[in-house]
Amino acid sequence: MYGRVQGYPGLYVVDAALIPGCTAATNPALTIAALAERCMEQIVAKDFG
């Protein structure tokens, strides 16, 4: 759902919780940034476009 929170229109959460599996061995900062950018593109296009 690209970070949308069910039952709360207009509330979005985009963080490491969206990454499946364990990422304890590496720093996921760039992965989280890329994921956030992808989610925002979808949210803006579908919710505000």
Image (cartoon, rainbow, N blue to C red):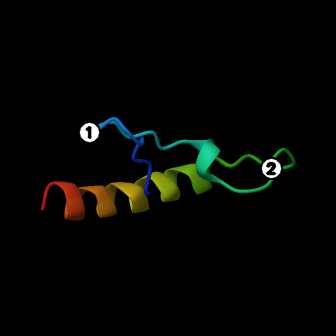
Find residue 26 and name its label: 2
Name which residue type carries label 2.
Thr
Given residues 7 and 28, the one toward you in this image is: 7
For label 2, the crowd category at 10 Å Cα-Cα, with few meaning under 14, some 14 to 19 and many 20 or more, is: few
Task: Estimate the x, y position of residue 21 in percent, counting from the top left.
Answer: 78, 55
Task: Estimate the x, y position of residue 49 in percent, counting from the top left.
Answer: 12, 62
Task: Estimate the x, y position of residue 11 in percent, counting from the top left.
Answer: 33, 36
Query: In the figure, 7 relative to 42: above or below?
Result: above
Q: How far is disc 1 from disc 2 in space, using C-alphas?
A: 32 Å
Residue 30 is left or right of residue 44, and the answer is right
Q: What residue is drawn where x is 45% and y is 52%? A: 36
Q: Counting residues from the N terminus, which is met first, the one under dot 1 or under dot 2?
A: 1
Q: Which residue is under mark 1?
A: 10
Residue 45 is left or right of residue 1, and the answer is left
What is the tally of numbered marks visible in this picture?
A: 2
Please, what secondary structure does the residue beneath circle 2 have? loop
Residue 40 is left or right of residue 16, and the answer is left
Given residues 20 and 31, the one toward you in this image is: 20
Q: What residue is drawn where x is 44% and y is 48%? A: 3
Position of the N terminus, as image quadrant, is bottom left
For label 1, the crowd category at 10 Å Cα-Cα, with few meaning under 14, some 14 to 19 and many 20 or more, is: few
- State yes or no: discs 1 and 2 in contact (Cβ < 8 Å): no
Q: Residue furthest front?
A: 7
Find residue 47 and name its label: none
Q: What residue is drawn where x is 57% and y is 50%? A: 32
Task: Estimate the x, y position of residue 10 in percent, counting from the top left.
Answer: 26, 39
Q: Residue furthest right?
A: 25
Name which residue type carries label 1.
Gly
Q: Nearer the viewer, mark 1 or mark 2?
A: 1
Please, what secondary structure does the residue beneath circle 1 have? loop
Given residues 29 and 41, the one toward you in this image is: 41
